[in-house]
């Protein structure tokens, strides 16, 4: 499942980042921000028009991500 598909308030664990090329700067930046394998994530909120951007909590830190960026993060839902 992709992070962009996660519903508001649902929790998941990051499994991987899907790069579009070998030098994908966005994928590298996501990893630098803490989107790494095993890290818990949660969708905290979303923008009013089309749900973009998403407010995502990684550990104890929150980030606003565009849906296109969140779609690169592969997650596994947690019960």
Image (cartoon, rainbow, N blue to C red):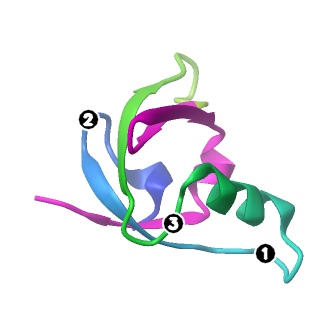
Q: Residue at x 46, y 63 (%)?
A: 2
The residue wearing badge 2 is 9
Helix, strand or loop status at disc 2: loop
- Considering only vertical position in the picture, is 55 above or below 23? above
Q: Nearer the viewer, mark 2 or mark 3?
A: 3
Q: Which residues are magenta?
A: 54-79
Percent of width and height locating residue 28: 75, 64
The residue wearing badge 1 is 20
Q: Is residue 55 visible?
A: no
The residue wearing badge 3 is 36
> Which sits earlier in the primary sequence, circle 2 or circle 3?
2
- Considering only vertical position in the picture, is 7 above or below 51? below
Tell me if 77 is positioned left or right of 67 in this view. left
Helix, strand or loop status at disc 1: loop
Q: Residue at x 66, y 51 (%)?
A: 69
Q: CA distance from mark 2 to mark 1?
A: 28 Å
**Proximity of marks 3 and 1: CB atoms separated by less than 8 Å:** no
């Amino acid at each position: 499942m992709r992070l962009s598909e996660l519903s508001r308030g649902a929790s998941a664990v990051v499994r991987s980042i899907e790069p579009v090329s070998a030098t994908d700067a966005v994928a590298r930046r996501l990893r630098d921000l803490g989107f790494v394998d095993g890290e818990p994530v949660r969708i905290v909120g979303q923008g009013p028009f089309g749900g973009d951007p998403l407010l995502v909590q990684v550990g104890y830190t929150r980030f606003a991500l565009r849906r296109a960026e969140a779609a690169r993060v592969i997650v596994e839902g947690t019960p």
